[in-house]
Image (cartoon, rainbow, N blue to C red):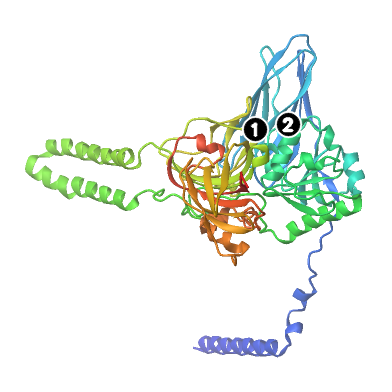
Amino acid sequence: MREAWRGLLLALGLCAGVVRAEEEEAAVPAEEALPAEEALPAEEDTRLPGYVEISGAPESASDGGLRVSVATALLRPPRGYYPLEVELHNTGSTPRVVDIGVTATTSEVRRVEVSRRQVEVGPRQRLSAWMIVPVIARNGIVRVESPGLKLRAFSFYATEGRAQPVLVLGTEKAFEEGTHLPRVEEGRLSVRFLSSENAPRELAAYVGHPRIVVAGDVTALPADVWSALEAYAATGGLLTLLHPPRDVDLRLPLLTRSTTGVVQPYGFGQVRLCAGAEGCASAILADAAAMDADATLPLGPVRVASPPSRWGGYHGLNMMFPLLPGVQAPVGRFLGLITLFVLAVGPGGLLLARRKGPVALLIAVPAVALVTCLAFVGWSVFVEGFDLHATRCSVTWLDRARDRAATVGFGGYYANLEPEPFQVPVLSALLSSDVEWESRPIEADWTRGMVVTGGFLSARTYQEWGEVAVAPSRARLGVSLEGEQLRIRNALGAPLAEGYVRSGGGWWKLPALAEGAEGLATRLPETTRDTVTEALRPTQEMEQRLDRVLGRMWEPLPEGGFLARLEGPGRTFSAAIPVRLHEGVHLVRGQVDGP
């Protein structure tokens, strides 16, 4: 009993002490209550206004008459792809056929050959073979094979660094002379230098980088390299020229003005023409600071929904939902079939065994299981079918003067079977989701351009892909005056749903026209403003995925300019893939043919 009373008194004393401590703590002012937390200073950015070069000593090996050198440390952009250089030197007197394969470790801890290329190296020739690697492959192995030779495998890795990534075409000396930015240990820029003469020719090698700088003489670049860089800017990239050439208006035909020192719109992207080293360096550092301050800024021309998560739903982390209806498994119907199967083999089987005996049960249970399996297969065949289902949306900047079109778009795909390999043009690229741990890397053969051999779409899995392309196009919208009327000829290559054109100082509303058809436009009141094109704003799904480039579509139209909404598969290269189209929404902006 004494021990019980002693324990009770001790407990009461402890409670009283806790209450007094809480009252004393409450009496202390807020700034004195937690001095340790306020004493902690905010984390300072110790990076200097300079750059850090991302590079590593290349690995080399030789066998017979072939010497191979592979880069080991690469700059990894936020999305898309990065180029990996494999230098081949044939010291012999006969040509050699060389097969190069890049095998990467994916998020699922399995090795996949993501890139393959076959090249022929002439006698005593030295060339750079560029392997385009998806950013999901952070490291991997390069295998080089040639008949009669045995070369070891080369390992590589890609890193982002602490600073904002910048891809520079030119030498380190030219970059420092053009920007006066020093090379430091901890800088605000992570830079990778590529040789201007041996730079990649494919748009995919550049499209994932948020900014690209041409440090040397632009006129010295090979024509196909410059075409890829110009397409990069036209489809949403930021291209900086440290030394703009005199004929910059001819080399960048979509420039509306050639003002130096400021960022200028260029198609769906931007171009900066530097006027001096100090101003250019300040602008590049300001871009990096803005990206550091706001991590939500879009890093590419198009963003797409992540693949279906194994842990729940199709929306992933970016809160986007599928563009196709019915891409989720019919769980309710399948549960109904399973319930019927359980009832048939459970209570039904017991009843059958009592009436007909165990032999009948041995026959009935496999038969019911076979019927259930056939029901599942029948649903897949007759309801879902074997077609590739798709929804496609895009925006196109029509460059009628040069018969070409710059397009940024996306598509949602679903099929029971994985599609066949298909070709991607040189000035085009596929962009996947930013959510890497749920993504499957694209597998491609780059021997004759990009041929997608795998990874585009898994069977019975919904997948979205972004697309950018600059391609030749004869699409046009013809207009002609007939008295007080404006006649429209639709030669845009797809059905015209609606649109607006500015002609004769006024606004006209385009009629709905089939491809190749003609019709009369409706003149709008003189009080109509430039905001009339806002009526063409697309759905929320399209706004989410193209929010960075859609703003260019709503800029005021010049005289003779038009903005139209089309239907159909669209203008991107994926339109050549046979699909069952669920929906197609495409915006086209350009100049009319006619008065």
User: Vertical placement of 107 versus 449: above or below?
Assistant: below
The secondary element bearing badge 2 is classed as helix
Left or right: where does residue 444 sit relative to residue 373? right
Residue found 51% across the figure and 30% down from its top: 421
Residue found 64% across the figure and 49% down from its top: 301
Q: Residues within 10 Å of mark 2 (few under 14, many from 20)?
A: some
Residue 348 visible, this orientation: yes
Residues at circles 1 and 2 in contact by the CB criterion of under 8 Å:
yes
Q: Image quadrant of residue 471?
A: top right
User: Vertical placement of 222 versus 275: above or below?
Assistant: above
Left or right: where does residue 363 sit relative to residue 566? left
The secondary element bearing badge 1 is classed as loop
Q: Image quadrant of residue 385?
A: top left
State the residue position of label 2: 224
Q: Nearer the viewer, residue 498 or 140?
A: 498
x, y percent for residue 194: 80, 36
State the residue position of label 1: 426
Chain-order first, disc 1 or disc 2: 2
Q: Image quadrant of residue 72?
A: top right
Name the amino acid, label 1. Answer: Val
